[in-house]
Amino acid sequence: MNLPNKLTLLRIGLVPVFAVFAALAVPTHGRLWYLLAGIVFGAASLTDLFDGKIARKYGLVTNFGKFADPLADKMLTTAAFLYMQQEGVCNPAVLIVILAREFAVSGLRMLAAGSEEKIVIPANIWGKLKTAGMMVTICAFYFGCALWPENAFLRSAANILCWLCAAVTLFSGITYFTASKSLFSDMYGGKNTH
């Protein structure tokens, strides 16, 4: 297993560690728990930055990485948004948009991989912007709460950023399906299958 894939697996392994600290922060609003959650989330986010750069620079891009890297991102950001929602920061509608997009794009990737051509759909620029925006929002929230645990302005700003993340998420999902129109026409030949 190459280094980028190990970094991706490390990111997946950090999800439950982050979840423990985030869970402890929710009822107590303890600065230490917010700080630890932010540090773990930030470290996991950095593995996302480095695994892709290393894979491209040294020609270590693999089909496993193309599937596992977005999956690791989804696991990490979904866990964070769930805990933020518990804190009343992330509206449930934001979570619904994010999860619906993630399931839809994952389903699209499975369809593509199961096609005759065995197509692997990598992350596009909008998917990367979506993930980066989520990671910045989440880091800002947890590190902000480590400094000001119950600051109303911080929580309002985080809520606005969550809505912006939902908008970019929705748009990025649309771009994946728009770019994959040929996959559907090839699968169904443009004919009614009934």
Image (cartoon, helix red, strand yellow):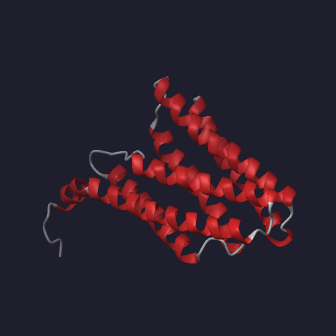
Indicate the quadrant containing the C terminus: top left, top right, bottom left or bottom right.
bottom left
Relative height, residue 77 to residue 67 (above, below): below
* Number of marks present in the image shown: 0
Residue 25, image x, y percentages: 81, 64
Q: Residue at x 65, y 49 (%)?
A: 12
In the picture, residue 177 is in which quadrant? bottom left
Q: Quadrant of the N terminus?
A: top right
Query: Which one is nearer the viewer's eye here, 175 or 74?
Result: 175
* Whole-percent x, y for residue 78 in the image: 60, 62
Q: Viewed as shown, does residue 53 lie left or right of 184?
A: right
In the picture shown, does residue 27 fall above or below 2?
below
Toward the viewer: 182 or 22? 22
Indicate the position of residue 8 as horizontal and vertical percent values. 60, 41
- Position of 85 compared to 113: left or right? right
Q: For residue 145, say whether it is visible.
A: yes
Q: Residue furthest top?
A: 58
Towards the viewer: 111 or 137 = 137
Name, please, the residue furthest toward the front.
153
Residue 186 picture location, percent across and down: 19, 55
Q: Is residue 83 visible?
A: no
- Relative depth, front residue between 115 and 22: 22
